[in-house]
Image (tube, coloured by chain):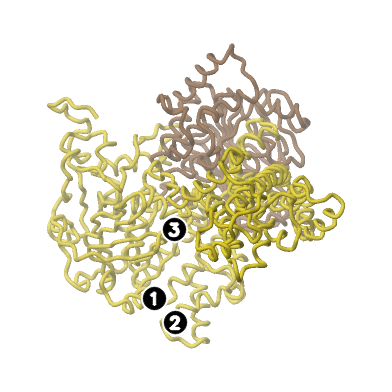
Amino acid sequence: MALVEPGPTGVKTQAEAVASVVEPDESAAARQPLGLVFWLAATWIAILVFLAVFRDLLPLRDPEALGIRTREVAQNEGLGSNAWFGADGQGRDLFARVVEGVRPALILGISVTLIAGLLGSVIGVTAGYLRGRVDAVTTILIDIALAFPGLVLLISVRATFGNSMLVFITLFSLTSIPAYARIVRGASFALSEREFVDAAAAMGATRRRILLRELAPNIAIPVLSFAFIGFALVIVAEGGLAFIGLSLDEITWGKLIADGAGDIAQNPHIALVPTTVMFLTILAFNLVGDSLRQLYSPREVATQRRLRVGPHSNSPEMATAPAAASAERNGAAGEVLSIRDLRTVLHTPNGDVRAVDGVSLSVRPGEALGVVGESGSGKTMILRSIVGAFALSDVTRSGDVEVAGLDMLRGEPDDIRRTLGTRIGMVSQNPLTALNPVRRIESQITEPMLVHSGLSKANARSRALDLMQQVGIPAPEKRLRDYPHQLSGGMRQRVTIAIALANEPDLFLADEPTTAVDVTVQDQILRLLSSLQQEREMAMVLVTHDLAVVKGFTDRVAIVYGGEVIESGPTAQIFAAPRHRYTVALIASMPDLDLPSHSELTTIEGAPPSLIDPPIGCRFAARCPAAHDICRTTSPSVEHEGASGAGAGDAHWFRCHFPAGVTADEPMVDAAGEGR
Amino acid sequence: MAGSGNEHLRDEVLLSVTDLVVEFPAERKQVVHAVSGVSFDLDAGETLGIVGESGCGKTTTGRAVMRLAPVTSGSVVLNGTDLTSLGGEPLRQARRAMQMIFQDPVSSLNPSRRVRDIVREGIEIWGSPRDGDAADDDWIGEVLASVGLGDEGVPDRRPHEFSGGQCQRINIARALVMEPDVLILDEPVSALDVSVQAQILNLLEGLKQRFGLTMLFISHDLAVVKNISDRVMVMYLGKVCEIAPTDDLYARPTHPYSRALLASIPGHSLDLPPAGDLISGELPSPLDPPSGCRFRTRCPAATELCASTEPELSEVAVGHWVACHHPASP
């Protein structure tokens, strides 16, 4: 139900935020290939099907005919057995008997899977979609059915109806239905909360139509995946029952294993051959089922988390990077954070993503730097590259990142950890996922103090109270005892800020700190951050997609596009006179409160460049209204606005061949007459 | 604030919502007061923006008009038909004239279907007023082209092959194919980047001119709402605070909550005190909303009157209605 309104803006989890960088080009998110193992398993299943269908046409011995030399006899006579797998204890051809067992196995497995799968799906979809009382009753029935001892049922029914295939199919189906129903119910329950189901209802689709058109196709793959595993379970169950003497009239693998088990010491092959065949079959069905499930959730491919650090950068671009001008060690220029020519590459199955590509930035105490860009621009990856926190990718960082004089890429791990704990405070977008739901606020605030500052528990507690007051949490004593879920979104974000401030950091990193909160709360939190930052002379990096936030709360701003900083300088100056064509377009696409309603907005046509294979030349050229030929061939170098030289790190600079307000807005007609 | 009252409703409108109440049952026999007596109307060809923060009831209002949320009481009259009196098949038929666009453009599209089938869905369900499949195909092609998806390959592709902005265009096309009288948009650009957001806003503006669209535009983003709306309604905790022509509201916000909202916009240049002076405390629980004016617990101007008596909407300027005992002078 719509008890909770969707929060403002698309709130992304950290994993999604990374994913959006990992997959800058949506079409690049190709399906994973199924792999060799899948095809081997599928081949095995195909062979079984072939044997079952064409068994009567194959030149096989009668499985009941005697007269094959058993191994014992063969040994005595000094001859080999005249059958591939030898004979069983009574001299019958084991190969023919195993092949004979294929058909009952498949008939039983397929019938049970189809019947139970279909009936279970119907029950599951109905319960999951209709919900309410129908769902409650169905769930209880499923639970009871799952607890019912199927073996007892089988034994009692068999006494009356015998061992025919029909009896087994019926009994196995009845006992499998609840498992299917449960899986399908879960899947449809989740799916029916998706907006496309709402959209279909809003469109006026009938329930039947929603079930068939919207839910069924999306449930098909998980059900199919489970069907293969369910098939394997049926074969296992038959084997187990045969072992205790409950089996079909036909020759089955289970019977063969049970037959051979008595003679396992003398003639192990009699049990081993059907066991191996059964094992391979079960394995094959399980493998196919698992592969199908991966197909259903293609993002389940988790690469191992690995961090690599490249060599010191000595690329020629570094010389032109503005921060290089103030590149003295240890923040001699007073910098808390200094980044020079940072390059971060994410190694993904689709290729190497150059998420951060030659970025140089610096921040001084008491200064707030805004890093602004659209999704997939790499802005969040800049922040993650500073602290070395990457969710799931194999990552290489190169260039230089220094925090308070410490080399964050090549320093001793202990030093880096200490710097992270004591010099850097970090706040991320979603305050709910940033807090541990099962721990009280108090233990979460005091933890960094106990670990890094060695405060006593009592001191840490009184300091926690102080912090809670500073971030504007009313009744802090009571709140310390609360769990995160007892606090509103705004209060939670204040708590994460308090935690980040616990060790009096020199550098405060904020990644979309107010994207998940309402506008009045955003105002409070940004004012709070701003005043804390000024009081404590903290350096702050504020990463956001929101230009209004940058405009209102930062001293300097860096605009990120395609993994590069394309323009940087004092915030007021950039908003008053942006030079890079992308900055100009970005600012103009923002709805302006000072303009009357229905004012037309500037748009940027096209899509951002792929970071796997970024274009040569200016990365914005393909979308730029003022692009010339040179923009598509030559990467623009850094141009400084006004007086260059002194304090170049703070100055307004940009990378554009034809900056706005300096060159004409319309592209000159290229001699070649080449259009875009 | 948090006013009731229907004096602001006009005659001869396309859609008229009167005293809409939506309540949800909660644990221990409590009730969530999601929407508590909201009235507004929509003239043909008009765009009404609804703004407010989480929990103000704006989304529930939109869903209740669509009858996707249960209406506890009140009426929703579209083209002279009271939808709240309908159920079952007649409701399904009547609802055809309203279409909705949701916040998450990707999740609103069935991932296993092609664009052609998604956009055609309405016709499949309802049949077509046109003659034959070819005429339908022409119409679908025209609608796809009008939302900027006229390229040849588009109908055969599936949602995952499109960006978020393009998916929202598909959603808009799906709704437009039905030639709806009213289009309800719930945070349609909140999940999009600012440059893509601008494309969709411009597109909606163009479609409004071209097809004479009537829109109910729900958003938390005050700048977006200002850009798209003819009139704006501000909601707080299930009630209407203020409803006025857009430029009038943004130039002269009169309700204390509207003023707090506008003052909270980062980097704004409006003539308002800091937001911290206009609003304090936290949103009360919708399980137990304050008596009288629901904003009084956070309002610097609140008096005893505000606790005892609920303010009704009254007109402070032409078409500018405010539910407040102590409005700021406009």
Q: Quadrant of residue A455?
A: bottom left
Q: Residue furthest front?
A: A77
CB under 8 Å between discs 1 and 2: yes
In brown, which chain?
B
**Where residue A451 is drawn, which disc sits there?**
2
Considering the numbered disc 3 on the image, is that residue within a helix, a strand or a loop?
A: loop
**To which residue does mark 3 refer?**
A302
Q: Nearer the viewer, mark 2 or mark 3?
A: 3
Asked whether the residues under the numbered discs 2 and 3 touch, taking CB atoms below 8 Å apart as contact, a structural biologist would say no
Query: At 25% from the left edge and 53% from the top edge, which residue is drawn?
Result: A568
**Whole-percent x, y for residue A472 in the image:** 52, 68
Identify the chain drawn in yellow: A
The answer to whether A561 appears left or right of A653 in the picture is right
Q: Residue at x 30, y 48 (%)?
A: A612
- Answer with mark 2 or mark 3, whichever residue precedes in sequence: 3
Q: Nearer the viewer, mark 3 or mark 1?
A: 3
